[in-house]
Image (cartoon, rainbow, N blue to C red):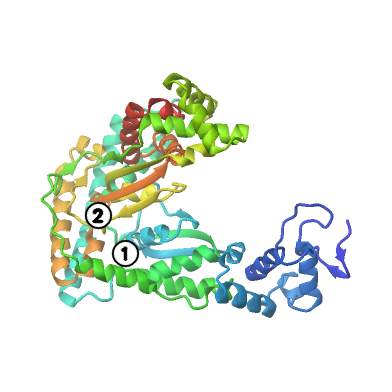
Amino acid sequence: METESNGVDLSRYVSNLDRNVYAIFNLPEEVIAVIFAYVSRSPASFRDNLAKLLRDDELAVGDSAGGMATIYSEKAAQFHEKWVVGYGHSSVAEHAVAHLGVEQISRLASAELELANTFNSFTEYSQRYQRPKRGNLYIPDFLPDGERDAYLSLQEAAFDTYETLLAGLVPHLLQTLPRLEGESDQRFQSRVEKIAFEDARYVLTLATCTSLGLTGNGRALRDTLVRLLSSPHAESRQLARDLEREISQVIPTLLKHVKPSPYLLETRRQLERLPAKAPVSSQRGRAFEGPQARFVDLPDYKKSLARVCSLLLISEKGWTHRDADQVVQNWSLEEKEAWVDQALKHLRFFDNPRDEFRHLHYHMEMQLSEANWHQLLRHNRGTHFTFGEPTVERGYTIPPHVREAGLTDTFQRFLTQAETTYARMLEHCPKAAPYCVTNAHHRQVNATASLWELYHLINLRTSPEAQWDIRDLFEQLHRELTRHHPVLAQYAQRRL
């Protein structure tokens, strides 16, 4: 295979020189973004534009670096300064990607990071499968001495209770859980311990540290930093600066002029001043066995069927919206249901529905544990959330195995201590109060998702492998969806 392009060796940077699809590597991320962006202004290929940069000595290539282009291109800097920073052509920045390891941040901050931009990808340390270490927690540096002692006392008690629950759960589960066919003693012990981890973690607080891997493009990462810099939490604002420093090693120009959002800051200040007295809630302060979920706004079933049928006609027949609507209006309910059934019936457990189902939107209200909430943040593929700050005022979830093992009193005694400490922090050091909330405490969440997204979530989260708490949440929603939208919901649950 020829490795030269106009006298420049490209073999270190592209996977082939003679095919229409090729990988690009060993280049600074911002240079890759420039090469991709050139396609809108130049008839030359990506490979030709790369060859030009190399020929013009815009990239320094050293043998000590294994042939990787290691010095950031001044031309790339000028390009991004002009088009991305100057003119706001932010789509260019999506071609530059950074991968980051983020360690020793609290569960509170990790949730803020994961919610900051939907285009980022995360893999997070799982408290379901690993045993957190005592003392591995976030300690705010703004705590007064007296409140610091109360805060640390609570965190120590959390780990004491966690270990007490583990000590009670493991022998109980060994005696009560059935073995899988052919399961060895070692595998059974390991499986039991993971189930115990899963349930004992409900007493850990949001101060407990976690680690995650983050991948994002330049545009998403920039928006992420703006959101974190505008956070009410000092830890998240510091995290933004730490991320900015490290991302700038990879895509420096794209992060220039990252600042907190005056709009977000001022809007929060104004809304906080608005007089609004909370009504007395019958659910406040109660303990539940699991989450509570319901649809706040379900689209009309017949109209939803008609909309999907019209969209199917548009995509399959090329009709106008008016023509498709006119035809569908003359169909019976059974005919509409039959068309929708045909569009869904061949789904397999790993398939997604057709894109027509993205046009139906559902609004849900959930009251769920912080443990459940952190699971929901991951693996959703386009759900939009509105949520309150962590609180102890909405009750909490007691894991079923904790009840069955006779550990409810131990669990609730610690939850009472957490709520007492939370109230103390709220009075004397309000910014520390959310770190006293446990994984068991409920958060109020509203969510909007398309039917396409609900198919993904219900299919994933109602499977036998799903964790019991989030499975309960989506089984509730699936039952209600099936009751009101039977044909639209009938293939959502496919992993049983």
Q: How many marks?
A: 2
Residue 29 in the image, given as x and y percentages of width and height = 63, 67
Residue 383: give its label: none
Residue 175 in the image, given as x and y percentages of width and height = 29, 31
From this viewpoint, which residue is outermost toward the left?
280
Q: Residue at x 26, y 62 (%)?
A: 435
Residue 389 in the image, given as x and y percentages of width and height = 26, 59
Q: Residue at x 20, y 72 (%)?
A: 148
Q: Residue at x 42, y 58 (%)?
A: 114
Circle 1 packing at 10 Å, graded few (<14), some (14-19), many (20+), is many
| Between 326 and 127, the one nearer to me in the picture | 326
Residue 438: give its label: 2
User: Looking at the image, can residue 252 be seen?
Assistant: no
User: Looking at the image, can residue 313 be seen?
Assistant: yes
Q: Mark 2 belongs to which amino acid?
A: Thr
Residue 331 in the image, given as x and y percentages of width and height = 47, 22
What whole-number distance in Å separates the C-alpha atoms at marks 2 and 1?
Answer: 13 Å
Question: What residue did someone put label 1 on?
Answer: 137
Q: Secondary structure at mark 2?
A: loop
Name which quarter of the figure residue 50 lies in: bottom right
Compared across the picture, whether 259 is left or right of 78 comes to left
The quadrant of the image that shows the C terminus is top left
The quadrant of the image that shows the N terminus is bottom right
| Between 363 and 25, the one nearer to me in the picture | 363
| Between 347 and 467, the one nearer to me in the picture | 347
- The image shows residue 145, relative to residue 221, as above or below, that is below
Circle 2 packing at 10 Å, graded few (<14), some (14-19), many (20+), is many
- The image shows residue 484, relative to residue 449, as above or below, that is above
Instruction: Tell me which label, 2 or 1, sits earlier in the chain.
Output: 1
Q: Secondary structure at mark 1?
A: loop
